[in-house]
Amino acid sequence: METVILTDPPKPPRETVEGFAGIGAATVGEALGRTGDLGSDLRPIQTGARIVGTAVTVLSWPGDNLMIHAAIEQCGPGDILVVVTRSPSQHGMFGELFATGLQHRGVAGAIIDAGVRDTQELRDMGFPVWARHINVLGTVKNTPGAVNVPVVINGQVIDAGDILVCDDDGIVVVPRGQADDALAKSRARLAKEEATRASFLKGELGLDRYGMRPVLADLGVTYRRHPEAR
Ligand SMILES: O=C([O-])CC(=O)C(=O)O
Ligand SMILES: [Mg+2]
Protein backbone atom coordinates (compact mmCIF):
# COMPACT_ATOMS: atom_id res chain seq x y z
CA MET A 1 0.00 0.00 0.00
CA GLU A 2 1.30 3.40 -0.96
CA THR A 3 1.23 5.80 1.99
CA VAL A 4 0.04 8.92 0.22
CA ILE A 5 -2.37 11.81 0.66
CA LEU A 6 -3.90 12.66 -2.72
CA THR A 7 -5.10 16.25 -2.82
CA ASP A 8 -7.77 17.89 -5.02
CA PRO A 9 -9.46 14.77 -6.43
CA PRO A 10 -11.83 15.33 -9.37
CA LYS A 11 -15.49 15.73 -8.43
CA PRO A 12 -18.71 15.82 -10.43
CA PRO A 13 -20.30 19.26 -10.84
CA ARG A 14 -22.13 20.41 -7.69
CA GLU A 15 -25.49 20.58 -9.54
CA THR A 16 -25.15 16.91 -10.46
CA VAL A 17 -24.36 15.90 -6.87
CA GLU A 18 -27.24 17.98 -5.52
CA GLY A 19 -29.54 16.44 -8.12
CA PHE A 20 -29.53 13.27 -5.99
CA ALA A 21 -30.85 15.13 -2.93
CA GLY A 22 -34.35 13.91 -2.16
CA ILE A 23 -33.92 10.65 -4.10
CA GLY A 24 -33.76 7.67 -1.75
CA ALA A 25 -30.72 5.38 -1.65
CA ALA A 26 -32.92 2.41 -2.59
CA THR A 27 -34.24 4.26 -5.66
CA VAL A 28 -30.70 5.13 -6.79
CA GLY A 29 -29.57 1.54 -6.18
CA GLU A 30 -32.45 0.27 -8.34
CA ALA A 31 -31.59 2.82 -11.03
CA LEU A 32 -28.03 1.48 -11.06
CA GLY A 33 -29.31 -2.03 -11.69
CA ARG A 34 -29.13 -2.98 -8.00
CA THR A 35 -25.45 -2.13 -7.72
CA GLY A 36 -23.44 0.38 -5.72
CA ASP A 37 -24.82 -0.33 -2.24
CA LEU A 38 -22.53 -0.79 0.74
CA GLY A 39 -24.57 -3.62 2.24
CA SER A 40 -26.73 -3.96 5.30
CA ASP A 41 -24.10 -4.02 8.02
CA LEU A 42 -23.13 -0.36 7.95
CA ARG A 43 -25.95 1.17 9.96
CA PRO A 44 -26.93 4.79 10.56
CA ILE A 45 -26.42 5.78 14.21
CA GLN A 46 -29.39 8.19 13.83
CA THR A 47 -32.74 8.05 12.13
CA GLY A 48 -34.10 10.42 9.53
CA ALA A 49 -30.81 11.72 8.10
CA ARG A 50 -30.57 11.97 4.31
CA ILE A 51 -27.34 13.26 2.86
CA VAL A 52 -25.65 13.34 -0.51
CA GLY A 53 -22.02 14.29 -1.03
CA THR A 54 -18.66 13.46 -2.54
CA ALA A 55 -16.27 10.97 -0.98
CA VAL A 56 -13.03 11.82 0.75
CA THR A 57 -11.56 8.38 1.42
CA VAL A 58 -9.27 7.24 4.21
CA LEU A 59 -7.39 3.95 4.42
CA SER A 60 -6.30 3.52 8.05
CA TRP A 61 -4.50 0.97 10.12
CA PRO A 62 -7.03 -0.72 12.44
CA GLY A 63 -7.12 0.99 15.82
CA ASP A 64 -5.12 3.97 14.54
CA ASN A 65 -6.79 7.19 13.44
CA LEU A 66 -3.74 9.21 12.39
CA MET A 67 -4.95 9.25 8.78
CA ILE A 68 -8.38 10.58 9.77
CA HIS A 69 -6.62 13.63 11.22
CA ALA A 70 -4.76 14.00 7.92
CA ALA A 71 -7.96 13.60 5.92
CA ILE A 72 -9.89 16.36 7.71
CA GLU A 73 -7.67 18.93 6.01
CA GLN A 74 -8.66 17.48 2.61
CA CYS A 75 -12.40 17.81 3.34
CA GLY A 76 -14.61 20.70 2.34
CA PRO A 77 -18.26 21.67 1.88
CA GLY A 78 -20.39 18.89 0.42
CA ASP A 79 -17.89 16.13 1.15
CA ILE A 80 -18.55 12.94 3.09
CA LEU A 81 -15.68 11.26 4.95
CA VAL A 82 -15.28 7.53 4.28
CA VAL A 83 -12.99 5.57 6.60
CA VAL A 84 -11.87 2.03 5.85
CA THR A 85 -9.35 0.03 7.85
CA ARG A 86 -6.79 -2.34 6.33
CA SER A 87 -8.21 -5.23 8.32
CA PRO A 88 -11.43 -5.39 10.33
CA SER A 89 -11.52 -3.02 13.31
CA GLN A 90 -14.09 -2.54 16.03
CA HIS A 91 -12.19 0.36 17.60
CA GLY A 92 -14.00 3.65 18.15
CA MET A 93 -12.04 5.26 15.31
CA PHE A 94 -14.28 8.33 15.05
CA GLY A 95 -16.31 10.50 17.42
CA GLU A 96 -17.67 13.95 18.17
CA LEU A 97 -14.31 15.73 18.13
CA PHE A 98 -13.62 14.67 14.56
CA ALA A 99 -17.22 15.47 13.71
CA THR A 100 -16.82 18.96 15.16
CA GLY A 101 -13.83 19.58 12.91
CA LEU A 102 -15.66 18.22 9.88
CA GLN A 103 -18.88 20.08 10.54
CA HIS A 104 -16.85 23.29 10.80
CA ARG A 105 -15.57 22.59 7.28
CA GLY A 106 -19.06 22.03 5.86
CA VAL A 107 -18.78 18.25 5.61
CA ALA A 108 -22.14 16.50 5.29
CA GLY A 109 -21.42 13.32 7.31
CA ALA A 110 -19.20 10.27 7.70
CA ILE A 111 -19.17 6.58 6.81
CA ILE A 112 -16.95 4.50 9.09
CA ASP A 113 -16.22 0.87 8.23
CA ALA A 114 -15.02 0.30 11.81
CA GLY A 115 -16.31 1.55 15.17
CA VAL A 116 -17.59 4.97 16.25
CA ARG A 117 -18.16 6.43 19.69
CA ASP A 118 -19.78 9.55 21.23
CA THR A 119 -22.93 8.53 19.37
CA GLN A 120 -25.25 10.53 21.62
CA GLU A 121 -23.18 13.67 20.99
CA LEU A 122 -23.05 12.96 17.26
CA ARG A 123 -26.83 12.74 17.17
CA ASP A 124 -27.20 15.87 19.31
CA MET A 125 -24.92 17.87 17.00
CA GLY A 126 -26.78 16.66 13.91
CA PHE A 127 -23.74 15.11 12.26
CA PRO A 128 -24.95 11.96 10.48
CA VAL A 129 -22.77 8.87 10.66
CA TRP A 130 -23.08 5.36 9.25
CA ALA A 131 -20.86 2.78 10.93
CA ARG A 132 -20.22 -0.94 11.24
CA HIS A 133 -19.71 -0.87 15.02
CA ILE A 134 -20.29 1.35 18.03
CA ASN A 135 -17.47 1.02 20.55
CA VAL A 136 -15.82 3.06 23.31
CA LEU A 137 -12.38 1.51 22.66
CA GLY A 138 -9.92 4.23 21.66
CA THR A 139 -7.08 4.35 19.16
CA VAL A 140 -3.45 5.36 18.74
CA LYS A 141 -2.11 7.77 16.12
CA ASN A 142 1.15 6.53 14.71
CA THR A 143 0.72 4.30 11.65
CA PRO A 144 0.68 5.66 8.10
CA GLY A 145 -2.10 5.00 5.63
CA ALA A 146 -3.60 6.80 2.65
CA VAL A 147 -6.14 9.52 1.83
CA ASN A 148 -8.21 9.74 -1.36
CA VAL A 149 -7.13 6.37 -2.71
CA PRO A 150 -9.80 3.87 -3.83
CA VAL A 151 -11.20 1.85 -0.91
CA VAL A 152 -13.58 -1.12 -0.77
CA ILE A 153 -16.53 -1.73 1.55
CA ASN A 154 -18.40 -5.04 1.26
CA GLY A 155 -17.05 -5.49 -2.28
CA GLN A 156 -18.02 -2.02 -3.49
CA VAL A 157 -15.18 0.27 -4.60
CA ILE A 158 -15.37 3.90 -3.46
CA ASP A 159 -13.00 6.36 -5.08
CA ALA A 160 -12.39 9.95 -4.05
CA GLY A 161 -15.01 12.20 -5.61
CA ASP A 162 -17.60 9.45 -6.04
CA ILE A 163 -21.12 10.45 -5.02
CA LEU A 164 -22.58 8.88 -1.88
CA VAL A 165 -26.34 8.76 -1.37
CA CYS A 166 -27.05 7.97 2.30
CA ASP A 167 -30.27 7.53 4.25
CA ASP A 168 -31.96 5.27 6.79
CA ASP A 169 -31.84 2.35 4.34
CA GLY A 170 -28.10 2.49 3.73
CA ILE A 171 -25.60 3.94 1.30
CA VAL A 172 -25.28 3.81 -2.48
CA VAL A 173 -22.11 4.80 -4.32
CA VAL A 174 -22.41 6.52 -7.70
CA PRO A 175 -19.02 6.39 -9.47
CA ARG A 176 -18.12 9.95 -10.37
CA GLY A 177 -17.68 9.08 -14.08
CA GLN A 178 -21.28 7.81 -14.22
CA ALA A 179 -22.86 10.68 -12.31
CA ASP A 180 -24.91 12.26 -15.12
CA ASP A 181 -26.15 8.94 -16.46
CA ALA A 182 -26.96 7.71 -12.93
CA LEU A 183 -28.87 10.91 -12.16
CA ALA A 184 -30.97 10.58 -15.31
CA LYS A 185 -31.69 6.92 -14.49
CA SER A 186 -32.50 7.77 -10.85
CA ARG A 187 -34.97 10.46 -11.92
CA ALA A 188 -36.59 8.03 -14.34
CA ARG A 189 -36.84 5.41 -11.60
CA LEU A 190 -38.37 7.99 -9.24
CA ALA A 191 -40.99 8.88 -11.86
CA LYS A 192 -41.78 5.18 -12.32
CA GLU A 193 -42.21 4.74 -8.55
CA GLU A 194 -44.50 7.79 -8.46
CA ALA A 195 -46.63 6.32 -11.25
CA THR A 196 -46.78 2.96 -9.44
CA ARG A 197 -47.80 4.67 -6.18
CA ALA A 198 -50.61 6.49 -7.99
CA SER A 199 -51.76 3.22 -9.52
CA PHE A 200 -51.68 1.41 -6.13
CA LEU A 201 -53.66 4.27 -4.58
CA LYS A 202 -56.34 3.55 -7.20
CA GLY A 203 -56.43 -0.07 -6.02
CA GLU A 204 -54.49 -1.62 -8.87
CA LEU A 205 -52.32 -4.63 -8.07
CA GLY A 206 -48.64 -5.17 -8.64
CA LEU A 207 -49.50 -8.58 -10.11
CA ASP A 208 -51.27 -6.82 -13.00
CA ARG A 209 -49.12 -3.70 -13.25
CA TYR A 210 -45.92 -5.72 -13.55
CA GLY A 211 -47.50 -8.45 -15.69
CA MET A 212 -46.70 -11.12 -13.13
CA ARG A 213 -49.85 -13.26 -13.43
CA PRO A 214 -48.49 -15.19 -16.45
CA VAL A 215 -45.19 -15.58 -14.59
CA LEU A 216 -46.99 -17.19 -11.64
CA ALA A 217 -48.82 -19.47 -14.05
CA ASP A 218 -45.60 -20.38 -15.89
CA LEU A 219 -44.04 -21.23 -12.55
CA GLY A 220 -46.88 -23.63 -11.81
CA VAL A 221 -48.37 -21.59 -8.95
CA THR A 222 -52.05 -22.50 -8.68
CA TYR A 223 -55.07 -21.07 -6.88
CA ARG A 224 -57.32 -23.23 -4.73
CA ARG A 225 -60.07 -22.21 -2.38
CA HIS A 226 -59.06 -22.61 1.28
CA PRO A 227 -60.61 -25.85 2.57
CA GLU A 228 -62.24 -24.01 5.48
CA ALA A 229 -63.33 -21.02 3.41
CA ARG A 230 -66.76 -19.68 4.33
O1 LIG B 1 -10.62 11.30 19.30
C1 LIG B 1 -10.77 10.15 18.89
O2 LIG B 1 -9.89 9.28 18.89
C2 LIG B 1 -12.13 9.73 18.37
C3 LIG B 1 -13.14 10.44 19.17
O3 LIG B 1 -13.57 9.98 20.22
C4 LIG B 1 -13.59 11.77 18.73
O4 LIG B 1 -13.37 12.15 17.57
O5 LIG B 1 -14.23 12.44 19.55
MG1 LIG C 1 -14.47 11.45 21.57
Image (cartoon, rainbow, N blue to C red):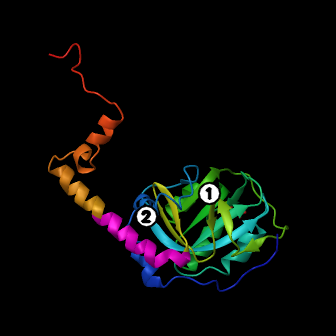
Q: Residue 50: percent from the left, percent from the top?
A: 44, 64
Q: Residue 212, percent across and down?
A: 29, 44
- State which quadrant residue 184 falls in: bottom left
What residue range appears in magenta?
176-191
Residue at horizontal 21%, vertical 20%? 225
Residue at 75% x, 56% y is: 138
Choose top left, top right, bottom left or bottom right for residue 47: bottom left
Question: Residue 90 colored magenta?
Answer: no
Q: Is residue 106 left or right of residue 87?
A: left
Q: CA distance from mark 2 to mark 1?
A: 30 Å
Residue 121 seen by the camera: yes
Q: How many callouts does the rendering have?
A: 2
The kind of residue tagged 1 is: Asp
What amino acid type is highlighted by mark number 2? Val
> Magenta includes 180?
yes
Q: Position of residue 214 (x, y in %)?
A: 28, 41
Q: Which mark is residue 118?
A: 1
Q: Residues within 10 Å of mark 1 (few under 14, many from 20)?
A: some
Residue behind label 1 places its C-beta within 8 angstroms of ligand 2: yes
**Occupied quadrant, residue 100:** bottom right
Q: What residue is disc 2 on?
A: 28
Drawn side of residue 58 relative to residue 221, left or right: right
